[in-house]
Image (cartoon, helix red, strand yellow):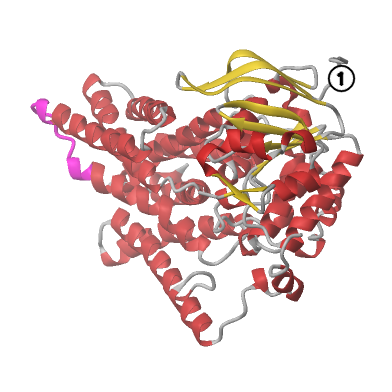
Amino acid sequence: MADAGAALRIDRATVAYDGTPVLQDVNAQVQPGETVALIGPNGAGKSTLIKAVLGLVPVASGTITVLDRSPVAARRDVAYVPQADTLDPEFPISVAQVVLMGRYRRVGWLRRPGRTDRHIATEALDQVGLADRAKARFGTLSGGQRQRVLLARAIAQRPRLLLLDEPFNGVDALSQDALLTAIAALKQQGAAVVISTHDLTLAHLACDTACLLNGHMYGFGPVHDVLTPDLLRATYGSQALELRGDRVIVARP
Amino acid sequence: MPWLDVAFNRALIEAVLIGVATGMLGVQVVLRRLAFFTMSMTHATFPGVVIAAVVGIDLYLGGATAGILAALAVVALSRRRGHDPSTATAVALAAGFALGVVLLSAQRGFTKDLTAYLVGSILTVTTEDLAVAAAVTTVVAAALSLGHRALLFTAFDRDGARAAGYRTTAIDLGLLLLISAVVVTAVPAVGTILTLALVVAPAGAARLWTDRIATMTAIAVSVAVASTIGGLLLSRSWDVAAGAAISLIATGCFAASMLVGPRHSLLARWLHRRHPTPDRAATSPQEIGASVVTQP
């Protein structure tokens, strides 16, 4: 295996909150330009894994290596897209200001964002199809549009690894298409993308690889090999629901 | 400087300095919903001031020490998962005030009046008080402009800011210490409750007039300075308590903005109900059409 140069390498990692293991013995490797879907029920540890890759939650045992560095050391090259509905819609901030945040860490404390930074932010907003909403207050946009703005913020950061936490939850079809197009463009440029999602159809559409999680890993590999009825039933347990013989649809709790 | 020898002129300068500091910082307090923390700081610094008075050291030093300890305690307690920070804050408020009263009552012959602490005495500020207020206002202005991007990011999206590499706990602590510094400076002049009014009311009023933080800061500072100067003039011509007059003007501005401000006010909502403008979030026809298309 060509280990060096991987965007993300997880070796027998166990992640615990306050001493209670949330995820045990996770093994995964993500190459540049690869897109991975994290699939599992609520509370399966998808968000925890993303936070561990960001270095926000410590690894209890095993290792997580991001771009051949520790998660904390790699943060500059890693972008995180939170769920839009976790942010206060009343907060007085414009769409353009949110996207410009993607440049903050490169700008530093003393300098102000320059013309290049603004240009990169405008371009990123254009990539998610919202260039005409730059001046609007973030909270006045629809849920799907807010999610696209947060993706634009991540694009403006020019990341080599992009982590998205449930980006398709409650998102309309137009915004979903815009998100998928922008993610595909990042992948084209060689960024590795990790997406946590409930939506198996979107996992098929957007991702090469799937990672099945529920406390520990139930499967990791090409989407078509991993998203099988048997493995999904094993992952979801009683929450799995079978329709028309071969399709597994998972009920959202 | 003979001009500074006049008590009213000193009070005027103190009023402007405190107005600028509370107006700027109030924006952060309102955006992060730290009004209750500010309230508790006004009381938690009390025992520090009393101890300083008893021991005979500088009152600001005593208040600032108590403020730093209280800010550290609140950050430490709210970092523990499952702990509601407002509980920790309320306990710090009650404990601080009780400790101050106990210490004060144990001192026989100690004449400093408690009501002066509650409502302040801006007309008795000294030139040293002015120097402290000028220094604190300068530090607050410098810290807020240097840290404004970090503060904006962490206030808007805490997890995102941590992921981007901002040390959010350090930023929180820095902001709480700035609040303590402003409280310690403003309390001797306008009192505990009235300091709260001057921090929260101008920024709260400003929020009702704009959706831009830069504009909000400008309005908050203007309202705070206008309140402090207006309150002083009012107290001189009508012979009423200065601190209370300042607070009444500040809270009056907030109440007026609640009634007639262009954003979120009662009038704006009433007009909106009479002439509803369609929700901009969902007007695009493609979006409404697209949302009914089922996935293949």
Q: Nearer the viewer, residue B27 or B280?
A: B280
Q: Is residue A194 visible?
A: yes
Residue B116 location (% of width, % of height): 23, 44
Q: Position of residue B254 (x, y in %)?
A: 42, 64
Residue reaching furthest to the bottom: B274
Q: Quadrant of residue B197?
A: bottom left
In this view, the residue farthest toward the front is A245
Task: Return the x and y of residue A157 as percentages of the image width and height.
Answer: 79, 39
Q: Residue at left 24%, top 45%? A: B118
| Depth check, front residue: A39 or B100 | A39
From the top left corner, tell me how far across and down residue A182 is, in percent.
83, 49
Q: Nearer the viewer, residue A136 or B22?
A: A136
Q: Secondary structure at mark 1?
A: loop
User: At 8% from the left edge and 26% from the top edge, which residue is drawn?
Assistant: B108
- For disc 1, the chain is A
Horizontal side, residue A183 vs residue A16: left or right: right
Residue B166 visible to the viewer: no
Q: Tell me the residue that label 1 is attached to.
A: A5
Magenta highlight range: B105-116
Q: Residue at x 25, y 62 (%)?
A: B239
Residue B236 is left or right of residue B270, and the answer is left
